[in-house]
Image (tube, helix red, strand yellow):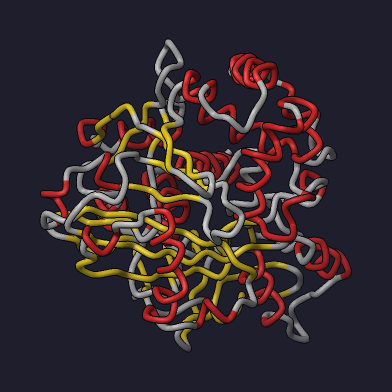
């Protein structure tokens, strides 16, 4: 391998790959370094039947303009299929449909006035731009003020609690505003059903295409060896060390999670690094960003577990917020005839469950699965897979807008781009591509 590059990128998730593609297309010699044995990051895949399957569920919204733009640029727009999705709701006793406005009217837990207010509020959200005013307002307060206490306590707050645990009460209203607006904006014109899309063959198709494009333009990859340190001299980053070797560049871009980035930065302090107070202040600011970990249980079953694509679980005794039926979007024949269901649980970054065996995770999840799907044994679990990531999602708390890191760091030639910077939007493939575009524009002017 060469030792000199124009740009080095830490991380080969979708953000790192998209960035490597944009820059190599402009003639930059790029090196992408990934600690895992393969590319994809939070969108990485494994083989299932004739297709690839993401370790965490991924779908595309109609409003994902940056992702659709990249797919079109790569000639992959023909690989995208859209389908009207269906949503269910499990309230602790039963599983009911929740795809259409009429479904809400049939729920016994909420009064008629609040049901009508709920529908009107969703319609107003589709054209509202008020999210930017909500950074210092808690999601709980805004939801109660907007939808009423009954709806908020019954529907929204259990979902927030499942995702963010004890931090749920401090989540920013700006974040939940944008999340609800995006989902509602992906519905049909009559707002009756949500329309989602999926890449035929899985996100692996996009990953492979990006890697082929980068390699075709002279870019290179290192897998299975993370960055040990940045090479710093007089306050500037001159490259990296990885696998015991040095690789030099005038610009280095980190796309890894903030705690991983600051760990590398701390390891880079030397007598000649030019370490200054502004770097120390930057690391302290970054340390205020809290993360949640995710554990994904992917089930392969002989029969479908639910007739819905997405089931929101508002039973607070159940530790996971959703069941996602992948084979609602993609026929089972693509996965060897089996039905695929995702169960994702969010935990603190120090949770012992992250280091547990797949058998232990399944043992913990099984009683709750049996509660929601009582006949799960008859549906026959063929096999299951367990994946986890310690830094899956930032905790988008109130005031998060004030601590979002800039793309430029205090170290000359060192940049950071990751899912903290999509705020107040929710992290997804589209926003990841948008951040990659922003960094590309910053580098190239």
Q: Could you tell me how many numbered marks the image carries?
A: 0
List x then y, in percent, for residue 131: 72, 28
Q: Residue furthest bottom?
A: 244
Is 21 above or below relative to 88? below
Q: Residue at x 65, y 39 (%)?
A: 154
- The image quadrant where one finds the N terminus is bottom left
Q: Residue at x 37, y 26 (%)?
A: 195
Q: Residue furthest right?
A: 277
Left/right placement of residue 396 relative to residue 21 reads right
Residue 211 seen from this side: no
In terms of image quadrants, where is residue 328? top left
Is 381 above or below relative to 247? above
List x then y, in percent, for residue 220: 34, 65
Q: Residue at x 52, y 58 (%)?
A: 320
Asked whether 270 or 18 is in front, the reply is 18
- The image quadrant where one finds the C terminus is top right
Asked whether 271 or 420 is in front, the reply is 420
In terms of image quadrants, where is residue 86? top left
Residue 376 seen from this side: yes
Left/right placement of residue 338 relative to residue 206 reads left
List x then y, in percent, for residue 221: 35, 67
In terms of image quadrants, where is residue 130? top right
Q: Residue furthest top?
A: 190
Is 439 above or below relative to 277? above
Left/right placement of residue 177 relative to residue 142 reads left
List x then y, in percent, for residue 259: 66, 69
Asked whether 401 or 53 is in front, the reply is 53
Asked whether 141 or 379 is in front, the reply is 379
Q: Residue at x 21, y 36 (%)?
A: 79
């Amino acid at each position: 391998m060469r030792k000199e590059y124009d740009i080095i990128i830490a991380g080969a998730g979708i953000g790192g790959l998209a960035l490597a593609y944009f820059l190599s297309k402009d003639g930059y010699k790029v090196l992408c370094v990934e600690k895992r044995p393969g590319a994809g990051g939070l969108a990485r895949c494994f083989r299932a039947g004739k297709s690839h399957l993401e370790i965490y569920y991924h779908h595309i919204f109609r409003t994902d303009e940056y992702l659709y733009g990249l797919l079109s640029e790569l000639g992959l727009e023909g690989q995208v299929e859209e389908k009207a999705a269906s949503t269910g709701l499990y309230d602790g006793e039963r599983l009911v449909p929740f795809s259409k406005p009429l479904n809400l009217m049939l729920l016994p837990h909420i009064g008629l006035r609040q049901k009508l207010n709920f529908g009107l509020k969703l319609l107003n959200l589709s054209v509202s731009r008020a999210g930017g005013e909500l950074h210092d307002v808690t999601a709980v307060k805004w939801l109660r003020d907007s939808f009423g206490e009954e709806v908020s306590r019954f529907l929204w707050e259990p979902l927030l609690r499942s995702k963010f645990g004890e931090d749920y009460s401090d989540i920013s209203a700006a974040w939940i505003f944008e999340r609800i607006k995006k989902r509602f904006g992906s519905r049909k014109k009559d707002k009756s059903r949500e329309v989602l899309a999926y890449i035929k063959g899985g996100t692996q198709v996009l990953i492979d295409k990006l890697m082929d494009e980068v390699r075709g333009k002279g870019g290179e990859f290192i897998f299975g060896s993370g960055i040990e340190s940045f090479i710093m001299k007089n306050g500037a980053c001159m490259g990296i060390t990885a696998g015991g070797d040095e690789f030099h560049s005038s610009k280095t871009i980190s796309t890894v999670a903030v705690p991983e980035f600051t760990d590398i930065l701390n390891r880079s302090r030397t007598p000649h690094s030019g370490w200054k107070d502004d770097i120390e202040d930057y690391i302290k600011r970054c340390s205020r960003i809290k993360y949640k970990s995710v554990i994904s249980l992917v089930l392969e079953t002989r029969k479908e577990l639910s007739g819905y694509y997405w089931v929101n679980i508002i039973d607070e005794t159940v530790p996971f917020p959703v069941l996602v039926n992948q084979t609602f979007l993609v026929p089972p024949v693509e996965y060897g005839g089996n039905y695929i269901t995702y169960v994702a649980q969010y935990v603190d970054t120090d949770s012992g469950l992250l280091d547990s065996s797949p058998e232990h995770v399944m043992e913990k999840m099984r009683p709750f699965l049996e509660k929601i799907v009582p006949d799960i044994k008859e549906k026959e679990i063929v096999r299951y897979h367990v994946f986890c990531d310690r830094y899956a999602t930032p905790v988008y708390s109130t005031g998060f807008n004030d601590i979002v890191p800039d793309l430029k760091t205090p170290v000359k030639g060192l940049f950071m781009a990751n899912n903290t910077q999509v705020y107040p939007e929710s992290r997804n493939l589209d926003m990841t591509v948008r951040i990659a575009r922003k960094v590309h524009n910053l580098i190239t002017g």
